Image (cartoon, grey):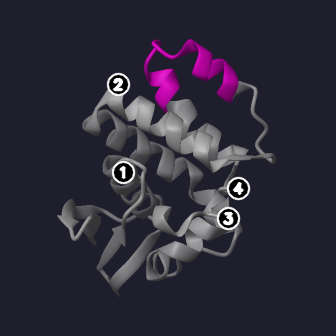
Amino acid sequence: MSGEIQGAWFKAILGSMTAAASRFPTHQRTINGMRDDTWYAWEDYVHLMRELHKSLGDRAVEAIAQRSGMRTLPLARARGFDSVEKVFGDFDSVLRSLVKGLPSTDSARTVAFMPLAAELESGSRLPAPLLLGTFRGFLMGFGKIVTEAKTTPRLGMQRYSLKWM
């Protein structure tokens, strides 16, 4: 069995995307029926996310993920990730606290962390714009101004470089 993601997180991210496009009424009804405190299959989340990314495109997914990241930061804060250092110093721990049984290939690990920059790496099946937007949203949720956010393919993975002030 693959991992499970908490309903609050699933709904916040995917619900924002299905609401942004009226083309997904069935998905929207499913998401609206989810409970915040229930855990749902990670594979369903990955499948729906990839489907929505294909329909919405990179820019829309990144923008929606950024907004959703800002709104869902309280979920990470409630688990003790209450500073930029705690979130980006070990992003894998953040994801593992939000997704039970997260497949290691879907995680994002911190490669380097400095007071005003971080590099993360992931081979996740999730779309790169989703992760980049989520990273940006978390930083903005901490009141940071993101000055650089880019994704670079590297050895079959994606490297995410972030700078802020």
The kind of residue tagged 2 is Ser
Choose the circle earlier in sequence order: 3 or 4.
4
Q: Are marks 3 and 4 in contact (CB under 8 Å)?
A: yes
- Range drawn in magenta: 17-31
What residue sits 52% from the left and 44% below the top?
A: 46
Quadrant for the C terminus in the image = bottom left
Reading the image, the residue beneath label 3 is 101
From this view, report whether residue 43 is shown above or below residue 148. above
Asked if residue 24 lies in the magenta stretch, the reply is yes
Q: Nearer the viewer, mark 4 or mark 2?
A: 4
Q: Nearer the viewer, mark 4 or mark 1?
A: 4
Asked if residue 7 lies in the magenta stretch, the reply is no
What residue sits 34% from the left and 71% below the top?
A: 121
Choose the circle earlier in sequence order: 3 or 2.
2
Mark 4 → mark 1, Cα distance in angstroms: 28 Å
Image quadrant of residue 43? top right
Q: Give the crowd class for mark 3: few <14, some 14-19, many >=20 residues within 10 Å.
A: some
From this view, report whether residue 72 is shown above or below residue 29. below
Reading the image, the residue beneath label 4 is 1
Mark 2 → mark 1, Cα distance in angstroms: 17 Å
The secondary structure that dominates the magenta segment is helix
The kind of residue tagged 4 is Met
